[in-house]
Image (tube, rainbow, N blue to C red):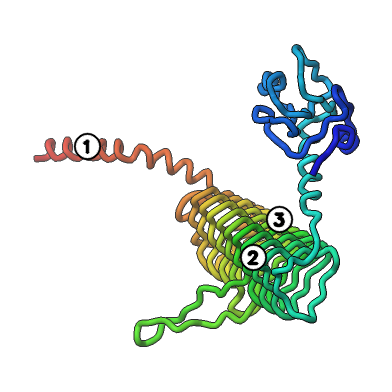
Amino acid sequence: MKFSAPQIAQLLEGTIEGDSSVEVNRLSKIEEGTLGSLTFLANPKYTPYIYTTKASIVIVNNDFEPNNEVSATLIKVPDAYQAFTKLLTFYNQQKGKISGISKTAIYPENQEFDATVFLGEYTIIGNNVTLGKNVKIHHHVVIEDNVTIGEGSVIQSNCVIHADTKIGASCYIDSGCVLGSEGFGFAPNKSGSYDKIPQTGNLVIEDAVDIGANSTLDRATLGSTIIRKGVKLDNHIQIAHNVEVGENTVIAAQSGIAGSSKIGKNCIIGGQVGIIGHLKIGDNVSVQGQSGITSNIDSGATIYGTPGIDYKNYLKSFIYFKRFPALVKRIEAIEKEFNNVHS
């Protein structure tokens, strides 16, 4: 995709200084700019790069005045950082304007899709699948029977979506995700081995949910595993069967939630957090990275450590923990002195 300086200036409501005929087809950092790329200058410490960058267009603040010659075309705006963010959003939207059915896609003969739907190469669609308008299914995706995907959602390459999964509108599922997989359900028997418990429920993902690459969300044993509206999951997240994650909760990479735990809304959960099963975590809870949660948490709490405790109490305790070897030496010295006195 190529964009001219006037097109960009119009989109950003900015003014052009320099060659208005220049065109760009990619974005770059200012220090890595090359001919045909567009970049921005918002942080003053990067100002020296504007005189050496090879980028064709640089977005700058209105008050920027060069001290030396600048080879790039400048587009001046009130806030260069916000303008570049707006441009990134526009760029992604343009990239996403793909539609049509790839020749290698496999789907039932009687299946019909809206003209705005995109199916990538070697995608497999099962029976009774519903895809909303502007749904984009990229290459090598497997979608099993009775799946519903809402309008404007994007499924990146190499995802597997198991039967009966429901995905809302405007969701983004990154590459390698497995959605609606069989939960980890086994019951011990008299012989000491384990019998598999059938997982007969499904996975429900509401609107505007983002799920990072290589994450796995299990379907319920009975009922539904539910990811509420606006939830944001990082890469490598494990959500077990019958878990519920509340609206607008954010979970960082490599965290895992065991079966049947309920997470409230507007929570912030750090990376590598482990939450055991059948717990209830309230709203607006913050859990620091690498914490292990083994009990229920009230709304509004900030938790740290394993097992997780109040954040301030953890920091106070950690002061003593760091001093523990010295405290042991002091105690041993006192014991030795006491024994010498009384021997």
Rendering quarter of residue 280? bottom right
Q: Is residue 191 visible?
A: yes
| Residue 224 to residue 216: above or below | below
Number of residues whose C-alpha sits closer than 10 Å to that of mark 2, classed few (under 14), some (14–19) or many (20 or more): many
- For marks 1 and 2, the one nearer the N-term is 2
Tell me the number on the disc at residue 114. none
Rendering quarter of residue 226? bottom right
Q: Which residue is mark 1?
A: 334
Secondary structure type for disc 2: loop
Q: Which residue is mark 3?
A: 248
Of labels 1 and 2, the one closer to you:
2
Name the residue located 88 percent from the left edge and 30 percent from the top edge.
14
Secondary structure type for disc 3: loop
Kind of residue at badge 3: Asn
- For marks 3 and 1, the one nearer the N-term is 3
Location of residue 260 in the rendering, given as x and y in whole percent from the top left corner: 58, 70
Number of residues whose C-alpha sits closer than 10 Å to that of mark 3, classed few (under 14), some (14–19) or many (20 or more): many
Kind of residue at badge 2: His
